[in-house]
Amino acid sequence: MKLICIGDSLTYGYGIKRNEVWTTILKKSLGIEVINKGISGDTSAGMLSRLYNDVILGSPTHAIIMGGTNDLIWNLDIKQITSNLATIAFQLMQNYITPVFGLSVPICTELARKNWSAMSDFNNMNKKLRQLNSNIIKFSNSYKIKVIDLYSSFIGENEDGQEKYYTDGLHLNVNGNIKMAHIVLLSYNFA
């Protein structure tokens, strides 16, 4: 068994030591090869463009796909993001790789505004993430693709990300990465 995780800074583990990133925790827990192909700032189109080199050529049995937040920050159309992610899943299946979608964690809005105000005002970001997640779930149900719901596990009482898990409103701290690995382990049997 071999797992490659493709995504953006949430997959990469922005701001976290490599041994504290959720993919490394997953590797230690499962005792299998887990390769992190997250790139900070990447979009769904960027993930699609590097899919062949970063994932398909690596011949994994499974691939976790997690992206779309950066697309939304740059105000890209949700239908286009969904199409890019669906194309990634189709290409994986055509190459006998089992795709698994990870729904991105919510934004911790006020903390994100404080640290990333030059990028976006973050209004309605979590609403847009819920719409994107709904599209991913609908698509996945049609093709029997497993979805790991990371979003719901990090949402707080006010429909915002729980600040205790974030470093800057967008990225998870060590405890957030531990929680993420735990959710993945409980949600999917990589046997």
Image: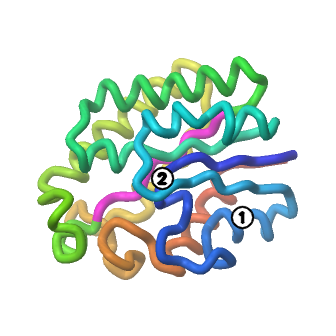
Could you say which disc has been placed on residue 98 in the image? none
Q: Earlier in the sequence, mark 1 or mark 2?
A: 2
124 vs 143: above or below: below
Does 65 lie within the magenta span?
no
* Residue type for callout 1: Leu
Disc 1 target residue: 26
Q: Which residues are magenta?
A: 99-107
Name which quarter of the figure residue 111 lies in. bottom left
Vertical placement of 102 versus 12: above or below? above
- Secondary structure under badge 2? loop
User: Label 2, on which residue?
Assistant: 8
Task: Answer with the quarter of the image where residue 163 lies.
Answer: bottom left
Q: Nearer the viewer, residue 23 or 30?
A: 23
From the top left corner, tell me how far across and down residue 83 is, in percent. 41, 23
Q: Residue at x 66, y 56 (%)?
A: 36
Label 2 Cα neighbours within 10 Å, binned few <14 / some 14-19 / many ≥20: many
Q: Is residue 41 above or below residue 136?
A: below
Residue 106 on the magenta span: yes
Give residue 100's position: percent from left, percent from top. 62, 39
65 shown above or below 77? below
Residue 127 in the figure: left or right of residue 146: left
Residue type, mark 2 in image: Asp
Under circle 1, the secondary element is helix
